[in-house]
Amino acid sequence: MISGLTMEQRGHEKRRMQGCVTGCVLAVFLWSVASAQLKYSISEETNEGTVVGNIATDLGLDKRTLKDRKYRIVSSDADPLFHVNLNDGVLYVSRKIDREEVCAQSSTCVINVKTVLENPLEVHYVQVDVLDINDHSPTFPERNITLEISESVSPGARFQLKAARDRDSGHFSVKQYKLSHNDHFRLEVKDKRDDVKIPILVVQKSLDRETAGIHSLILTALDGGKPPKSGDMKILVNVLDVNDNAPIFSKDAYSVTLNENAPVGTTVIQVNATDLDEGPNGDVVYSFSKSMNQNILNLFNINSLTGELTVKALIDYEEMDEYEIEIQASDKGLAPLTTEKGVIVKIVDVNDNAPEIEVTSFSSSIPEDSRPGTTVALISVNDLDSGLNGKIICTVNEDVPFILSPSLQDKMFSLMTKSPLDREKQSYYVLTITAKDAGQPPLSSEKTISVVVSDVNDNSPEFSLSPYTFYVTEGNDPGASVFSVKASDHDDNDNALISYHVVRDGGGENKVTSFLNINSDNGDIVALKGFDFESLKTFQFQVVATDSGTPSLSSNVTVNVFILDQNDNAPVILYPVSSNGSAEGVEEIPRNVNAGHLVTKVRAYDADIGYNGWLLFSLQEVTDHSLFGLDRYTGQIRTLRSFTETDEAEHKLIILVKDNGNVSLSATATVIVKLVEPKEAFAASDVKSAAKDDEDNNVTFYLMITLGSVSVLFLISIIVLIAMQCSKTTDYTSKYLQETNYDGTLCHSIQYRSGDKRYMLVGPRMSIGSTIVPGSHANTLVLPDRRRTSEEPKGPNTDWRYSASLRAGGVMQSSVHMEESSVMQGAQGVLVQNWPTASSAADAEGGEVSPPMGAGVDSNSWHFRYGPGGPGAPPQHLKPGEVPPEAFIIPGSPAIISIRQNQGGEDDKSDFITFGKKEEAKKKKKKKKEKKDKKDKGKDDGDE
């Protein structure tokens, strides 16, 4: 081989062989120089820095030279397990040692460590035996396994399982297995030569999938440690099915009812069968029994998967009322198992015929004035069903004024009105007649008929406005329509055809209505002549609207017409007016008058009103504008300056009088102003003054007559008002008086003035619940009777004087002047009190009446009535408002007012309380008399 190489290759080969020989020789030399071996043991998982052994001490090496000799461990690992300390030669653990990682599954684990010293070179070998500890648990190759075992397997069947592994060795490896408690399986262990134990699952009891389809087991592996470590594996045993169960129906018997005429496809019943097997062995299919009648097969159908029995054709109760159907359930096993069950179907008769409605007699139109109960139609109904299904209830919709009433004949009804009809509210009715039987569910049918309500003339025409008010401009065109009225009638046809006419009576308005014409068809009113505001400002008439019904109805309306003014009258000049009627006048003024002198005043009027009658004056033409001026509103002509010698003696002024209408109308007046010398002017003025005085005298005479007439009318009015006031009767009744008898109490007075005198009326206030006996004079306001024996009253005494206090006051207060018998009249229907006759005072001294303070009489409770009567006269009753001719007060007839306190009927003077100076004098006299009587009586007693 060498001879075949090139020279260069031979050189390289030679050098390599030489190197190998040199290395071998050096190794032998070193081995011979120093060789030694030590052996230590440590446990695995020892902590880092644990002392393994002191190599220097064990080998007898000088510790002082270890560093110089570069004592070290020779290892090919980048991360060696051990290291040596150069200071003391101790071998330490560099990192934790996992025996299973270093030595795998070896029964012994020895690590060889080579140490080297230099100068001289020494090599020492150290063996470290790593001792095993129980630091690993047994583990199974799979945490969960599933076994499928048929339920037909016999007891004793064996199923080998995978063995558990433990990374520890020797005594700490897997030593035993345990199986969780169950009734169907047990565990056997098989030992192999390499000390591996194999678990075996053995069936010890027959399996039944329908009872328990799954069995869950736990297999536990234990090692030899103390305490032992363990590992688990979950075993899931699925029991495979065998077709050993037949289908079973959910009910022992099936019975169902079915309505006749049930639609095709209606579900009759759904049967249900179950099979305890699974898969095809548990899938159930349904079918009819092979012994079924063909007629039944034509009427019914069954779903092979769901067991739903449905209707296949029309079911008629009249043909058969019950069916018995045989249904079988089978599974899909290789050898199918079958079960049969009978289903009883009972057919129920249903209400399958709706009522029929027939209108036998019908009147499509009915007058609106038909009475309730009027028959409109006869209705007949029929139902082919029987029993409750044939009983019929017939109705009509409730929102119509019609009702259905059953007739004596079965299944016959009368359609009649139930309330009055009004065509104007509703003229057409759509009636829905409903016939419903008593079946469950009920069947019904409807029939619609139409009823027309014919019109009766029961509505009068109605005007759109009442009253009508129209404004018509004067000067309208004759024959043209000025306004129109409109009426409507809620009736129909001829009953709603309206004609119009104007009411023409014999009154004053007939003159106006004679010039009016109305269109009888549409109500347009035409004026046959033009209206003139100045002669007629407003008028009123009535229009009647009549319908064409039989009998006809009508209504009327008042039409008020107001004429509107137009500017159709030109101004009329009142002054100046010449003798021939033209608006011309001559005015003479002295030449020496000053500026502002009133020359004359143009007077005019316009028959129009408003702006049409508002007149304005202006100078249309004047000879000299600097001499005269005209007030545009009053028409006064005044001088603007004094006259000079050079001014003309005669001036002509043309005045234009114009109104303010939209189209102004005007008139002109001519005033000729003549300038005269003062003497001539005075003479002319005297003549004018005389004429003017005559004219003024006539005017004064007329004014006096007018003022006198007005004064007379005024006085008459005052007298009438006073008379009415005095005789007026109060027309109300006290709410406290329930009876005509009452108790009058003098408690109030009312005063009034007539001219320069005052009068007081005294009357009782009604007390609640009080009564008075007719004929009694209790609480009567009495005037002492001072009459003479004759019946005629005495005239007033001319020597009558008022008291000093009355004369000083100037007014007589609280006095009553009466004559004859006076009567106080209360409210309406209340008893009238009598007053005694009062005569004029004969004494020379007057009297005063001062009623007690706070005594109050209702001011409206009484009226005075005068006439014959006295204290004993019976009370009088007057009708409400009755005032006799003698009911008046006579001023100047003084009387003394007394209050009668006696409850009896006697006129004792001691029963009177009097007021006034005269009465005070009487009281004094009476007291003196009483004292004198006492003295006299005392004397008499003394004499006795």
Image (tube, rainbow, N blue to C red):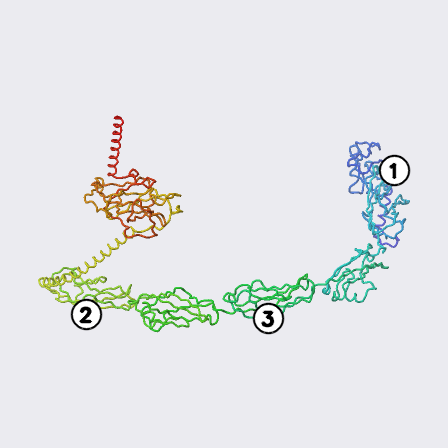
| Residue at numbered disc 1 | 32
Q: State the residue in front, 885 or 58.
A: 885
| Residue at numbered disc 2 | 581
Location of residue 169 in the rendering, given as x and y in whole percent from the top left corner = 85, 41
Q: Secondary structure at mark 2?
A: loop
Alpha-carbon span between mark 2 and mark 1:
193 Å
Disc 2 packing (10 Å; few <14; some 14–19; many ≥20): few
From this view, report whether residue 930 is shown above or below residue 454: above
Q: Are marks 2 and 1 in contact (CB under 8 Å)?
A: no
- Amino acid type assigned to the residue bearing label 1 in the image: Ser
- Amino acid type assigned to the residue bearing label 2 in the image: Gly
Alpha-carbon span between mark 1 and mark 3:
153 Å
Residue positioned 89% across, 53% down in the render: 1
Q: State the residue in front, 286 or 521.
A: 521
Observer able to see residue 943: yes
Q: Secondary structure at mark 3?
A: strand
- Between disc 2 and disc 1, the foreground one is 2
